[in-house]
Amino acid sequence: MQEILYLEIPTPDTTAVCHWLHNDFEPGTCEKVLTSQGFRLRVFDTTTNTETIPEKLPSELSVFVWSVQRTTYLKAFRWAQRSFPQEQQILKRLTTGIRSRFPHEYLEPPTINLSEQSIFEALAPYYPLTVKYFQKMPNGEYDLKRVYWWEQRWREGVRNPQEPRQVVFSHVGETRRQEDKGSGGQGETIPPSPIPPSPPPLPTTSSTSAGHLALFMQQLWQDWVIECCWWNGCLLDA
């Protein structure tokens, strides 16, 4: 058995994906046998009795889906070692159909004016769960602003991709040449990167270890939530 296709489908509705596989996807001339989470494709081969050759595997493809964390996944396996008839055409048709029926959708966050209202008030109508959980965090308002800023920066980078500035050099001379490049010989001032706040100190034997450990774990969890929000390109309710 060999894996021949893996897809991440941006929808939590695995039932809808399975329904599309059952009813809308047309593989071609082979036979489609429906299963609970997908289908099998097979061709008829009556030239050899599989009972007399135990190691002979059926000429079939197995396609199935499952869901984890609001995303549906699809895999296709080939049973035999030899390629299935029109295998690449079938996989291409399957991939194109899935991408057309279940496209990536990145909803645009609302434009807000923080001079007139807080970040909580601005986002509550659109992302109530996000606001709810960030309100429970220490410095949650500041951290939610960071998430919103990273979201906007990520989207701007997607719309207008630019080559990232080189930040690691082999020696000082290389740094100076890079600064002078493209600026007419005048050194270009590079603003320093922001330094994130330091986490609470680890507990020691002379301190109240339980309280310090709780603060430390809370800070780690809070930073993890912020990074996950930005990395996924969306807020929690999206």
Image (cartoon, rainbow, N blue to C red):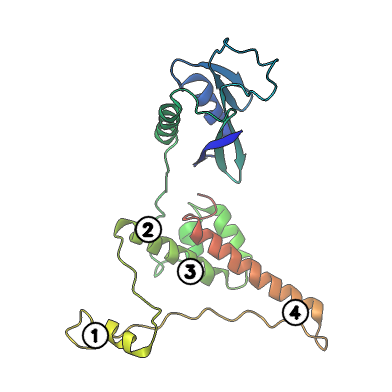
Q: How many residues crowd around disc 4 within 10 Å: few (fewer than 14), some, or many (20 or more)?
A: some
> Taking 9 as reference, is 149 above or below it?
below
* Mark toward the start of the polypeptide (3 vs 1): 3
- Name the amino acid, label 3: Arg
- Which residue in the structure is indicated by mark 3? 146
- Which residue in the structure is indicated by mark 1? 180
- Name the amino acid, label 1: Asp
> Taking 53 as reference, is 205 above or below it?
below
* Mark toward the start of the polypeptide (4 vs 1): 1
Question: What element does badge 3 sit on?
Answer: helix
Residue at (35, 75) in percent of width and height = 166
x and y, in percent, of residue 99 in the image: 42, 36
Front-most of residues 226 and 17: 17
Front-most of residues 108 and 33: 33
Residue at mark 1 to residue at mark 2: CA–CA distance: 30 Å
Question: What element does badge 4 sit on?
Answer: helix
x and y, in percent, of residue 149 in the image: 43, 66
Q: Nearer the viewer, mark 3 or mark 2?
A: 2
Q: Nearer the viewer, mark 3 or mark 1?
A: 1
* Mark toward the start of the polypeptide (1 vs 2): 2
Residue at the far top in the pictured view: 46
* Mark toward the start of the polypeptide (4 vs 2): 2
- Which residue in the structure is indicated by mark 4? 212
Residue 155 disc label: 2
- Name the amino acid, label 4: His
Q: Nearer the viewer, mark 4 or mark 1?
A: 1
